[in-house]
Image (cartoon, rainbow, N blue to C red):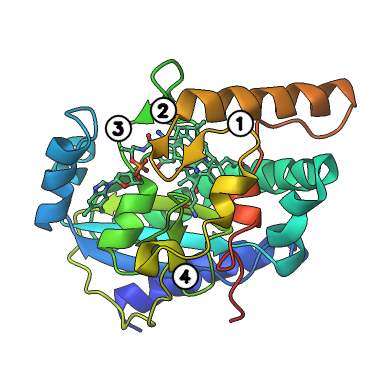
Amino acid sequence: MRLEERIHALITEEIARMGRSDLFRTPIVGFSSAADPRYGALTHIVGEWCRPPRTHLPGTNSVISYFVPFTKALADAPQSGREGAALWAEAYRAINARFPVINAALTDLLVKEGFAAGGVSAAANFDALALRSGFSHRSAAVISGIAAFGANRMAITQKGSAGRFSSLFTTAQLSALPAAPLRLCPYEEDGSCGLCFAACPAGALTPHGFDRFACSRCLAENGETLRREGQTAENTCGKCVGTCPLRYIEG
Ligand code: B12
């Protein structure tokens, strides 16, 4: 089996081993070259703090980007108010704890093949005050051909946008796998839909931009409410994803 296929199989097995088919579906895996000029361009488009792969792991040749899609019940959950937030919090906690395990297993595999590998964590890798990260998992997914950006700023894959991304850098030269066609956000395509703007309880997401601080305050309030209620407490909302017609795509 080619190394790319073994990586794909390992990520799939690790998700299956969680035994949470109530929350997660079979992952999508993509590969991109660290030399893709779009990685360098992000530094100029976004800011010098958004750094290309080789500054995270010297000698990086490829970026592994993977997405763990949510089940329909989980993708729909934010529509049902606070209970939805609680289920998202549970999923968020479960998958964020699993990503380092998966990345460690991938690193093991790659090191045994004679390559170096290393990653950034899926969530806790951002400046908590500036609310920005040195690496954008969703941009890596777009560059790897497994997702396209929507108006809600989510990266939408062939299985939808409700789910979570992780990435790993490696010195191995990995070739892109054949990618499935992507459905595009209707608002980005022709200005229709826009349900995500109306759904944002914080007024953070509008056709004119995104106020990450307002979004973050709303997430923190949700987390506080869940904590007071004694539920699994994480700072989540997901209304901009939960109302998106492309949140869940069968597959
Ligand atoms: C900090 C952070 C936040 C902050 C601020 C977000 C922000 N700055 O926009 C807060 C706390 C507000 C937040 C909120 C949410 N987040 Co958040 N967040 C992150 C985190 C840790 C870093 C994001 C970041 O700063 N990246 C750096 C910036 C520069 O890149 P970016 O915003 O990801 O990408 C933009 C640019 O690259 C830009 N761009 C412009 N030009 C070009 C050109 C090219 C060629 C490309 C490729 C890109 C590009 O487009 C992108 C979108 O605007 C990421 C994990 C990660 N490390 O990526 C998760 C992440 C983005 N969050 C995620 C989620 C799900 C959420 C929430 C729904 C919360 C929740 N779980 O309930 C909300 C949604 C808010 C929204 N509509 O964007 C997911 C997104 C999944 C998806 N399908 O896309 C991520 C990827 C976490 C994960 N591991 O899956 N988040």
Coordinates of residue 158 in the picture (x, y in percent): 47, 75
Mark 3 C-beta closer than 8 Å to ligand 1 = yes
Kindly identify which residue carries mark 3. Answer: 134
Q: Quadrant of the N terminus?
A: bottom left
Q: Quadrant of ligand 1?
A: top left
Residue at screen point 49% across, 31% down: 124
Amino acid type, callout 4 = Ile
Q: Is residue 222 visible?
A: yes
Q: Earlier along the polypeptide chain: callout 4 or callout 2?
A: 4
The disc, 2 or 3, on the residue closer to the chain's N-terminal end is 2
Residue located beneath label 4 in the image: 28
Q: Nearer the viewer, mark 2 or mark 1?
A: 1
Amino acid of disc 2: Phe
Which of labels 4 and 1 is toward the front? 1
Q: N-terminal of the two: label 3 or label 4?
A: 4
Residue at 47 percent of width and 70 percent of height: 28
Q: Gap between marks 2 and 1, in whole Å?
A: 21 Å
Q: How far apart are the two marked residues, 4 and 1, measured between alpha carbons?
A: 31 Å
Q: Give the mark, 3 or 1, whose residue is nearer the N terminus.
A: 3
Query: Mark 4 touching mark 1, by CB under 8 A?
Result: no
Name the disc covering residue 126, or none. Answer: 2
Residue at screen point 79% across, 41% down: 86
Give the amino acid at mark 3: Gly
Pointer 2 residue Cβ closer than 8 Å to ligand 1 = yes
Task: Give the x, y percent position of residue 56.
Answer: 23, 37
Find disc 1 in the rendering and name its residue: 202
